[in-house]
C-alpha cells in the first residue's frame, strides 16, 4: 500500500457503500489516508459526475469537492 502514497488520495465508491471502504484496512493502510489526507467521495452524484468524462460533469463534481480536497492538501504541507 506504500506505493499508493501521495499528497492526497481520492477514492470513489462504485459498487460498494462508502462505509465499507472507510472501514477497510487496506484503505486505512494507505499512508496519505492514515495521515488524514484521504478523501472518500460519498456522494453518488459526484462520483457519477467525475466518471462522466465531460466538462459539465467535472465542473459539477469539482464544485462539490474542492473544499475537501483543499483541506486534505493543506495537511500535506
Image (cartoon, rainbow, N blue to C red):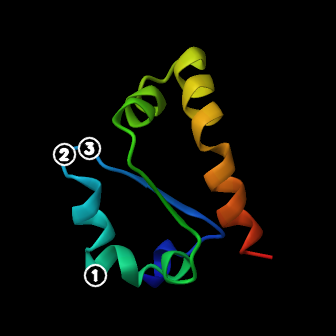
The answer to whether 52 appears left or right of 8 in the picture is left
Q: Position of residue 71 (x, y in %)?
A: 69, 61
In three-dimensional space, the C-alpha distance between marks 3 and 1, rounded to whole angstroms, equals 18 Å
**Disc 3: which residue:** 14
* Image point (39%, 29%), residue name: 45
Residue at screen point 30% across, 78% down: 26
- Which of marks 1 and 2 precedes in the sequence? 2
Q: Which residue is mark 2?
A: 15
Q: Position of residue 77 (x, y in %)?
A: 81, 76
Q: Position of residue 31 (x, y in %)?
A: 51, 83
Picture layout, residue 54 above or below residue 64:
above
Q: What kind of element bears circle 1?
A: helix
- Front one among 63 and 15: 63
Q: Is residue 72 above or below residue 58?
A: below
State if disc 3 and disc 2 touch (CB < 8 Å).
Answer: yes
Secondary structure, mark 3, is: loop
How far apart marks 2 and 1 lie (CA) works out to 18 Å
Residue at mark 1 = 25
Residue drawn at point x = 65 percent, y = 65 percent = 72
Amino acid at each position: 500500500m506504500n506505493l499508493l502514497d501521495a499528497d492526497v488520495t481520492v477514492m470513489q465508491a462504485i459498487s460498494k457503500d462508502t462505509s465499507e471502504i472507510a472501514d477497510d484496512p487496506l484503505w486505512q493502510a494507505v499512508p496519505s489516508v492514515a495521515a488524514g489526507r484521504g478523501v472518500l467521495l460519498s456522494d453518488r452524484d459526484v462520483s457519477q459526475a467525475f466518471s462522466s468524462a465531460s466538462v459539465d460533469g467535472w465542473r459539477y463534481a469539482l464544485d462539490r469537492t474542492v473544499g475537501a480536497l483543499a483541506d486534505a492538501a493543506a495537511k500535506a504541507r
